[in-house]
Image: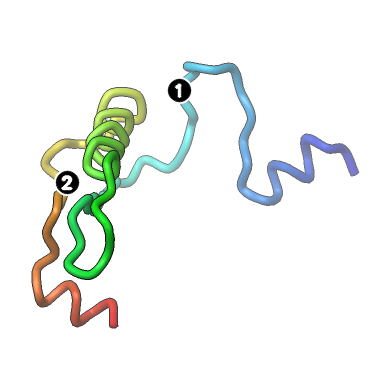
Amino acid sequence: MSSQKEEKDKGIVTGKVGEAAAGPGGKNYLLVIGIDKYRHCPKLHNCVKDAGDFVGLLINQYQFDQDHVIALRNRMPPALISCLI
């Protein structure tokens, strides 16, 4: 079996950098959480920035609709916390 065939079977599609990937035509939704300030841990310095950069990348290069993106920075709603525990 060829290497390219094996990659395709695993859901990995290779292409040139900057080339749009062909994929399903459905809608993409994104939840990004970036937290620099924790109650019981030392402060981090780039999580919020990295989360923002990631959102920008997906919107600008992968056609994510900004209306379908939720970005939480330095906070998490209690309802979400209870779902994750």
Kindly state the secondary structure of the residue where label 1 is placed. Answer: loop
Distance (Cα) linking label 1 and label 2:
20 Å
Q: Nearer the viewer, residue 36 or 42?
A: 42
Residue ID at (27%, 41%): 45
Q: Position of residue 84 (x, y in %)?
A: 28, 77
The numbered dot on residue 85 is: none
Judge from the rendering whether residue 50 lies leftward or rightward of residue 48; answer left or right. right
Quadrant placement of the C terminus: bottom left
Left or right, 62 with respect to 49, comes to right
**Marked residue nearer the N-terminal end (1 or 2):** 1
On-image quarter of the N terminus: top right
Taking the spot 9% from the left edge, 68% from the top edge, the residue there is 77
Q: Is residue 62 left or right of residue 5?
A: left
What kind of element bears circle 2? helix
Q: What residue type is labelled 2?
A: His
Residue marked by disc 2 = 68
Q: Residues within 10 Å of mark 2 (few under 14, many from 20)?
A: few
Give the residue number, with chain letter if any, for mark 1: 20
Give the image location of residue 82, x and y in percent.
19, 82
- Residue 35 is situated, as x and y percent measured from the top left of the image, at 22, 53
Left or right? Give the position of 57 relative to 33: right
Q: Residues within 10 Å of mark 1 (few under 14, many from 20)?
A: few
Q: Three-letter amino acid code at disc 1?
A: Ala
